[in-house]
């Protein structure tokens, strides 16, 4: 009997069609906003969003300013992930040197962060103060307010140059750990997104700008992809999947839907939304957009004209029906219900629970997407195949899902490519378009 297969598609599945990975989004969007169309999108949104205090080009500077106080947990994660890279005997000398440099810089910053905390000895003496203890605060606290501190000019320049280089080389083996933890576009979008729920107008404006510039950039990239794969030429990866497979995609593009229509495959479930719908937030009406819509003209004529933030008048603005990865997605209501995500998530869980085999392509198991990770965790005993260019990173990322330490895998060969296997789990080092999906 043929196994029922469900495929989960992350950003790596769209890469062959010219779409960037999450780590590449900020530099790619910045590049797009410097084109003629991008400048028109930027101007239209900024004209409609007065006092907007956000620019992609200043993210490196803002991150440096926050590093002393705002990224304590992230520096630990960066040091751990770079140390993991340095343990690879195949790492080249240049990358190894860069890794050691960054680790030592971050250890210095961690030392500053640690030393501003009240020491255990002082806390103990305060707690043992007898009748005098009520005169003293005995909880943990900082001796120095780091939010008011700053790096020296030279050290600030060093950190800024590292972050700026990381943004311009998003796939650098070492530097990408800086951007993924400190200047991650998904985190940027998530932070602004919550402004909708807290009615933080400044964050709402940031999210409007970020969401629509992302939408315009992705539409631009889609158009370029369809031009490249015109005249009946199939899109890579999607067109090679068996028709009877079910699909859950974390991408916003129409590639999965178009390929399913062309080949007669099952319609995909868009876990994070898609580019073809938007919602008027004033009345909650969900609207569809023509697939051949001009992104620049739509933002100028529709999106910008619907934006209104005035005293004693209900806020008016529209948003594309996409959401960033959120840990707490199942707990959100209102907007999420309006966009129809509750039903998509429920059906996605149903098809994964009923699957005999789960194929995962180009998905990084991001900590921010714990909702989907939990569903996968519930099905971890099934036949699971992960296809990714960076299996070393994946083995590290899935430890908490599959309870497998990186060194526990057995190295084998699958379709002529390296495969790391532990019981029912296989991780194959490959790009999605180079895999023969009919022979798995």
Image (cartoon, rainbow, N blue to C red):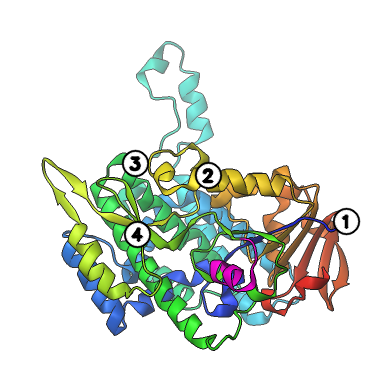
Comparing labels 3 and 2, the label whose residue is closer to the camera: 2
Disc 3 to disc 4: CB gap under 8 Å: no
Q: Residue at x 39, y 44 (%)?
A: 338
Quadrant of res 172? bottom right
Residue 197 numbered mark, or none = 3
Query: Residues under labels 3 and 1: Cα distance?
Result: 48 Å
Gap in Å between the C-alphas at discs 3 and 4? 27 Å
Q: Mark 2 = which residue?
A: 343
Pick whichever, 119 or 360, lies toward us: 360
Disc 1: CA contacts within 10 A as few (<14), some (14-19) or many (>=20): few
Sequence-wise first label, 2 or 4? 4
Residue 61 visible to the viewer: no
Is residue 108 or residue 93 the one in the foreground?
93
Q: What element does badge 1 sit on? A: loop
Q: Which mark is residue 65?
A: 4
Residue 1's disc is: 1
Res 124 seen here: yes
Q: Earlier in the sequence, mark 1 or mark 2?
A: 1
- Dot 3 alpha-carbon crowd within 10 angstroms: few under 14, some 14 to 19, many 20 or more: few
* Badge number at residue 30: none
Q: How many marks?
A: 4
Mark 2, other Cα within 10 Å: few <14 / some 14–19 / many ≥20: some
Nearest to viewer (mark 2 / mark 4): 2
- Residue 162 versus residue 200 in the image, above or below: below
CA neighbours of label 4 inside 10 A, class few (<14), some (14 to 19), many (20+):
some
* The magenta stretch spans residue 262: yes
- 412 is within the stretch colored magenta: no
Q: Is residue 307 left or right of residue 57?
A: left
């Amino acid at each position: 009997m043929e196994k029922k297969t469900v495929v989960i598609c992350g950003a790596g599945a769209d890469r062959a069609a010219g779409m960037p990975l999450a780590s590449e989004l900020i530099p790619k969007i910045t590049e797009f906003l410097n084109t003629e169309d991008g400048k028109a999108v930027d101007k239209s949104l900024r004209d409609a969003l007065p006092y907007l205090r956000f620019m992609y080009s200043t993210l490196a500077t803002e991150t440096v300013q926050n590093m002393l106080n705002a990224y304590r947990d992230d520096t630990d994660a960066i040091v751990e992930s770079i140390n993991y890279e340095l343990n690879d005997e195949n790492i080249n000398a240049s990358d190894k040197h860069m890794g050691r440099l960054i680790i030592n810089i971050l250890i210095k910053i961690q030392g500053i962060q640690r030393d501003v905390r009240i020491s255990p000895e002082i806390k103990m003496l305060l707690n043992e103060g007898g009748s005098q203890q009520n005169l003293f605060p005995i909880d943990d606290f900082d001796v120095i307010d780091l939010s008011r501190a700053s790096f020296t000019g030279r050290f600030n320049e060093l950190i800024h140059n590292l972050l700026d280089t990381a943004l311009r080389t998003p796939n650098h083996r070492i530097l990408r750990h800086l951007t993924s933890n400190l200047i991650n576009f998904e985190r940027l979008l998530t932070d602004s997104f919550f402004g909708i729920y807290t009615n933080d107008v400044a964050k709402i404006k940031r999210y409007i700008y970020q969401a629509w510039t992302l939408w315009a950039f992705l539409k631009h990239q889609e158009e370029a992809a369809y031009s490249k794969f015109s005249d009946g030429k199939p899109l890579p990866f999607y067109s090679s999947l068996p028709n009877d497979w079910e699909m859950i995609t974390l991408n916003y593009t129409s590639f999965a839907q178009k390929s399913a229509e062309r080949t007669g495959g099952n319609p995909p479930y868009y876990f994070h939304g898609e580019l073809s719908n938007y919602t008027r937030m004033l009345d909650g009406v969900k609207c569809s957009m023509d697939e051949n819509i001009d992104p620049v003209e739509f933002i100028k004529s529709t999106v910008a004209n619907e934006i209104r933030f005035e005293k004693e008048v209900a806020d008016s603005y529209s948003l594309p029906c996409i959401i960033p990865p959120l840990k707490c997605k199942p707990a959100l209501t209102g907007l999420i219900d309006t966009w129809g995500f509750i039903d998509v998530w429920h059906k996605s869980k149903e098809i994964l629970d009923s699957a005999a085999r789960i194929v995962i392509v180009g998905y990084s198991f991001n900590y921010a997407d714990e909702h989907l990770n939990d569903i996968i965790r519930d099905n971890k005993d099934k036949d699971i195949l992960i296809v990714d260019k960076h299996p070393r990173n994946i083995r590290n990322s899935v430890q908490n899902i599959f309870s497998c330490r990186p060194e526990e895998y057995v190295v084998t060969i699958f379709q002529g490519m390296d495969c790391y296997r532990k019981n029912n789990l296989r991780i194959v080092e490959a790009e999605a378009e180079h895999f023969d999906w009919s022979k798995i």
